[in-house]
Amino acid sequence: MAELHPYDVIIRPVVTEKSSIQSEDLNQYVFEVHPDANKIQIKEAVELVFPNDVKVAKVRTMVMPAKRGQRGRRWYLRSRQWKKAIVTLEAGHKIELFNL
Amino acid sequence: MNIQTERLENHTARFTIELDNERLEQAKQTAARKLAQRVNVPGFRKGKAPYRILVNYVGEGAVLEEALDILGNEVYKQALDQSGIAPYGPGEIEDFQTEPQPTFKFIVPLQSEVDLKDYRSVRLDYTEPVVEDEDVNRSLKMLREQHALVEESHKPVALGNRVTLDIHAVVPPTSSADADADVADEKPETNDQAETETDEHDHAHDHMPAGEPFLHEHDAAYILSEDYDEPAPGFRDALVGANVGENREFELTLPDDEDDYGEIAGQKVKFHVTVKKIETITLPSLNDDFAARVTAEEEKPLTLLELRMRVRENLQKYAGEQAKSQYAEEALDKIVEQAVVSFSEAELYDFTEDYLGRLDNDLRRRGLTLEDYMRITSKSREDLHNDYREVVTSNLKRLLVLRQLIQAEAVTVGEQAVDEQIERILEQYGPQREGLSSIFKDARMRDSVRSELLEQGVFDRIVAIAKGEAPEAAPVESVVDETAAETTQGKEE
């Protein structure tokens, strides 16, 4: 498998009520990441992409299942499967993008 | 907060209010919290989206607009309190700047102001109307006509007959070419002349001559009297000799009287008339028996001499009231002419809307609406505001002057006067009064009676001023009461 470029690892930040609380209270930031990205690649990508030399303390990943819907007898995909990463930064570090 | 006030030309004032940046920021935070309750931001429950997320989602402008609403109301109230200005209505934001510091500019319509000048020096000559014998005779003749013996006749039409007619009259196209263009510009009228036209209608007839309709009536009763020759001179003579069922076509020239006939004055009109019924009228003899018959319901029936005196009295009273009313109007015109009245555009706009509302009611009674009228004439509401601007301005001036006069002359109406007036009104309805009395318990009806009394009172005072008989300004409740009593008495008779 071809090596993932660090800029391809992080797809988007996940901005929800829950992720807002996590970033404010726990210094944890939530991203959608490439499905093939591993925790090491995610850590390197976050430290590279975001300014101010942020240091990542811990990365947790999970695969969010696809959501299916039904119209009559037909099933359809409401949202595809995706990979979520919760990145905990070391104390004192912040990502400005999430500075809400 | 720094507030500056300046008076502008069109009876408005401008508030310039400078605020601290902090206050704007606070307002934006409050606005964002309010907006968050309404806006559905993905990933957040309603009202839970943080400020930055919400601003990104709805845009800075939406938050600022909401903040201006909140802040504008607050600072406008404070500015009004501090400046001591009495506004006519709500102000409008003229401008808002954020740099170098948040600054509001409001335009505030001011309450109308009236300077009556030396209105007490206004004088007008008053001529007491005189009732001639001829007027009494005419009234008695009308009374005789009301009590006449009417019998159907099969003879040709003669003078003095009552005839039932179908009339279709038009102004031929050649002579009305100019008038056609102006039809769309005609304004609807709320006067009696317009109301009489409700009997006429607009539908096609095979026998109808081509042209601009002048008169279109079915089963219209006309008395071919020597005294009247309506609707056009020569109409009476043109029908003499006709039999029942006969059609007559003739052309008459309208009198050159623009007051009565407007643009078609002096033009030729083509009539197509069908005689449907002929009746002879036998007038009763003018003697004591007739007088007794006419006044049979009274305790003691009158003699002819007494009836003549009664008719003369009533005519004198009616003519006196008419003359007094006209005199008061003329005196008010003079007072309005010398008064300095200023009001804002907002007040004029509201007054015009009231006027259009009344116009709409009048049109509805005639089976139309203002919307229909606007569609027919291809005019917008704004066009109507422009069309009626002059007349509404004049009406508003009169109203404001009247209000000021009520204050200046301290004309007041007490609750007792209102009760007494309501009692007088109810007396006229006899047995039906029980049902009607509850209507007058409504506060709006009482207000309506009160304002009528106030108007009477101020008009009486205007008459007194113009005649040079007005006492020094003082409460004139008693005057109002007496006048009301006289007027009601007059109506009863």
Image: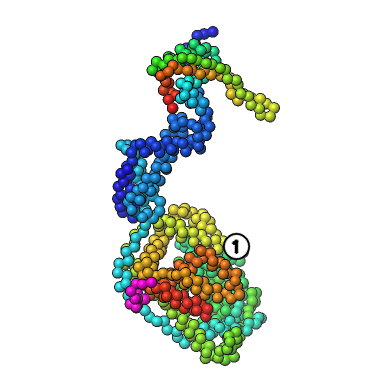
Q: Residue B258, position in %: x, y?
A: 44, 70
Answer whether residue B474 is magenta in the image: yes
Q: Residue B367, position in %: x, y?
A: 56, 61
In front: B326, or B183?
B326
Q: Residue B429, position in %: x, y?
A: 57, 74
Q: State left or right for residue B137 relative to residue B101.
A: right
Q: Which residue is rendered at x = 38% and y = 72% of the image?
A: B475
Answer whether residue B443 is magenta in the image: no
Q: Main secondary structure of the magenta part?
A: loop
The residue wearing badge 1 is B204
In front: B38, or B383?
B38
Q: Disc 1 sits on a residue from what chain?
A: B
**Magenta-highlighted residues:** B464-475
Query: Measured along the vertical axis of the image, is residue B302 above or below residue B90?
Result: below
Amino acid type for the residue under numbered disc 1: Ala
Element at label 1: loop
Residue B277 quadrant = bottom right
Q: Residues within 10 Å of mark 1 (few under 14, many from 20)?
A: few
